[in-house]
Image (cartoon, rainbow, N blue to C red):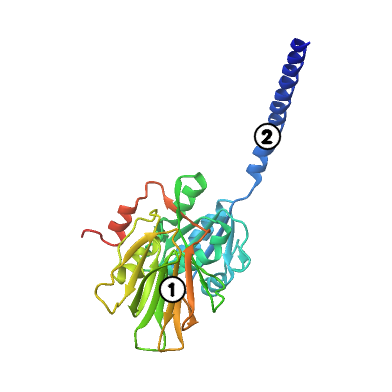
Amino acid sequence: MQKYSLLARNENNFALKNAIIGFFCICRPVLRQLKHEMKMKILLFGNSYQRQSLDGIKSLIGHIVSRGIECCVEREFHDYLVQSLGSCDGVHVLDSDSIPDAHLAISLGGDGTFLTTVMWVSPHHIPILGVNTGHLGYLTACNLANACDMVDDFIDGNYTTERRTMVQVQCDALHIAHPYALNEVAVLRHDTSSMIEMETSLRGLPLTTYKGDGLVISTPTGSTAYNLSAGGPIMAPSAPCLVLTPVSAHSLTMRPIVVPDDAEVSITTHSRSDHYLVSLDGESHPCPTGSTLTITKSPVNVIVVQRRGHNFASTLQQKLHWGQ
């Protein structure tokens, strides 16, 4: 009896396996057809300081549309292009507070435009390609002359991505609508020439009280921005760290310190003014003196598109003239 039971069980398993194989054989052409019919969508963001780049931007949009890709342009940038070019054919208009699902977001500008694009699209986990039409463009992957080639590489899958850490901020006395930063959080004096005092704790334990013009809490991505100008170290973008760098410290013994990025940083700021400033990637918010900021690693990452073969050292050499 047991022999026949095992035989029946094997026959049932064989029949189930054949049914599963048959199901996937039927579905495979359908899935392939659906994938073919799914239209790629690219979002475009930019600023209104593009007078020297308008022809290149027009060519980029035309190239995207010619590849059969749905191109959506942020409303204010679209209005600027229409005003400057006379028309912006073949595109859809999107509002920054209603971001659709998309395969790629392109930031046209410098690092400031890139950070604004991050603010809008990072919660939607859309990869971002930075196209530099500004000055340094440290966060960008290519310039406008190479943008069409970069779009082609993206369509063909010939690219890499990097996941960049962000931080988030909570203030016990103020609601911050967009509490995330890719580069840094800066605590700064406001309406006073006197220094401010920032009682700082790490993982709930007292670290020190910084006295000076401010304090920068930087991610690895932001280590080459405000942090570097304030004398902080450069960190590789993938390093699981944050750096706390004082701005014009009252004491020469107050040096930058690197901490793990999973450490909670708490800062209570005292000032002769009624308020101090907290700046998230340049977006400033006045906070009441005596309030406490809590800074933690954000659950949201930024997906940055890079050329295949890109590396951190080449970025330092090309954009910061490292070693020259």
Name the image quarter holding residue 271. bottom left
Q: Residue at x 67, y 42 (%)?
A: 34
- Looking at the image, which residue sits at the far left? 324
Q: Residue at x 62, y 66 (%)?
A: 93
Of residues 297 and 20, the one drawn nearer to the viewer in this rendering: 297
| First reached walking from the N terminus: tag 1 or tag 2 | 2
Residue 153, horizontal then vertical, whole percent: 46, 48
Residue at the disc numbered 2: 29
**Which corner quadrant holds the C terminus?**
bottom left
Q: Secondary structure at mark 1?
A: strand
Q: Which mark is residue 267?
A: 1
Residue 301, horizontal then vertical, whole percent: 50, 57
Between marks 1 and 2, how big is the CA–CA gap? 58 Å
Q: Amino acid at mark 1?
A: Ile
Of residues 304 and 103, the one drawn nearer to the viewer in this rendering: 304
Taking the image as shown, residue 305 lies to the left or right of residue 314, namely right
